[in-house]
Image: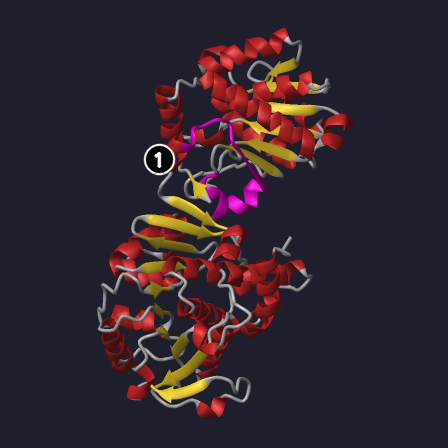
Amino acid sequence: MRLATVEQCRKIEEESIQSYELTGEILMESAGALAAREVDQSFYPELKKGMTAIVCGPGNNGGDGLVLARHLHSAGYRNITVYTLADESESSELFKKQFIRVEAQGIKWVNLVETPEKLEQIRSASLIVDAIFGIGLSRKVEGLFLKAIEIINSAKVPIVSLDCPSGLGCDRGIAEGAVVKATMTVTFGLAKPGFFIADGPIYVGRLRVLPIGFPHEALRSLATTHFCFNEKLARRYLPKRGVRSNKSDHGRVVVVAGREGMWGAGLLCASSAYRVGAGYVTWASFEVPSEHLIEAPEILTSHVDDPELWKSSDLAVAVGPGLGVTEETAKLIESLKEKDFPVVLDADAISACVKFDLFPLPSHWILTPHTGELSRIIGKSIGEIESDRYLAALLGSERTGCHLLLKGYRSVLAYQHRAMVINSGNSALAKAGTGDVLTGMIAGLLAQKVEPIQATATASYIHGRMADEWVRSGHDRRSLNASDLRNHLPTLMSRLATGAIV
């Protein structure tokens, strides 16, 4: 799914007006009308039950709110009150035009600048529409705006935000001050990167993306840097398995992982590669881990130095979980650079790359650092990384020269100046071993000839979705173990492939 930053949204609107002969007024009318229909369909009981409060700021987002008020009124909902948060002199020209129409239609309105005490009326609404700032906020929320957001959030009723919850940073998803906590966000044209990351999911609520008339060509040519990977895409890239296929048709994986005290990491990684469909999986290390295979007798074993291990030209390789940050690990990574295998590096392999300065890596390789590991790669603090996960992942990909998946809430996959957020996952994954499962899943998909971007994103989405379903099914977030992910893979993949996921 394509996303648009604030700057790109502005360019899309400019392009639509200048090259396609649309006007700001036409786009506003479309946005407000479609939003009204969405509100009608989603909150009919609340609209009929009592007063609908539409809180409008002075800009074009407030204008969208005024158009919505008119269309709801025309649909027969008479108990509507528009609350304005600015004087006419401070309002945009489009806002002024729409306000004249609201007055002409006889819709009740309250100027909160002149009568700030009437803010308290908003608490009595059965539905609140937030049309204060949208994506255009460029200053700290304070004064009357701050008080309005606090009152909106204190109301125990559904809240609908137009285009963006007011106060939320649309590009980075950071809430640096007061932010409207929406029940549903109705956004226009394309979703915004900040909706899926950092604080974004907390404030956005249910997301609806409405096509208000921006030309398809403008969207595709200008929104080119940020994307969201969702269930629909995961279903598309999950490999199909023919009824007459055999194990040789589904690829070979070599997992180089584990050492004394850390053999479980290799076991989780190798068994997960099998679970996603790889035909052969060989677990190798600097010591042969054969005595640790009681749980998974189907896994083949080898020593890293066995020349037979690397003879096949058709391998996908995973390196790192529990392997050790040693010169042996570094030498193995350097030797793999000379081969053409798709490779995913995790855990100790990442640390070895940093310690022994092995960057850049081949462009088709995949690196899967968590925030602490990425901090060592790009020389930025964890706080800096978390304040802009998209930028941090892009910097990491540029530094390492390959695909980079920044794990965490939410994971971001970066490559060649593009960033993709994975729309699944929660803090249940914050436990040792879950990353080993993900590494094996990525390698298993690579072995089945899925391209690195699609393999990484698909594995990461399924990995996160398993954690989401763990919580939805009533389990406590603290209780998920990495082996639970591996064991849940079969049923989730089946439902994903058949479209049975709700």
Residue 422 in view in this figure: yes
Q: Regarding mark 1 in the picture, which secondary structure is present there?
A: helix
Position of 143 relative to 253 (above/below): above
Q: How many marks?
A: 1
Q: Residue furthest bottom?
A: 291
Q: Nearer the viewer, residue 490 or 174?
A: 490
**Residue assigned mark 1:** 222
Query: Tell me, what colour scheme is on the image?
Result: secondary structure
Q: Is residue 336 magenta?
A: no
Q: Position of residue 79 (x, y in %)?
A: 73, 19
Q: Position of residue 353 (x, y in %)?
A: 27, 70
Position of 241 relative to 454 (above/below): below
Residue 58 in view in this figure: no
Q: Residue furthest right?
A: 49
Q: Position of residue 269 (x, y in %)?
A: 46, 75
- What residue appears at the point 41 percent right and 50 percent down from the top-left corner? 420
Q: Position of residue 96 (x, y in %)?
A: 50, 11
- What residue appears at the point 53 percent right and 57 percent down from the top-left corner? 425
Is 341 placed left or right of 159 in the picture?
Answer: left
Q: Is residue 204 magenta?
A: yes
Crowd band around label 1 with a 10 angstrom C-alpha radius: few (<14), some (14–19), many (20+): some
Region rendered in magenta: 191-216
Q: Residue furthest front?
A: 244
Amino acid on which disc 1 is placed: Leu
- What residue appears at the point 25 percent right and 73 percent down from the top-left corner? 339
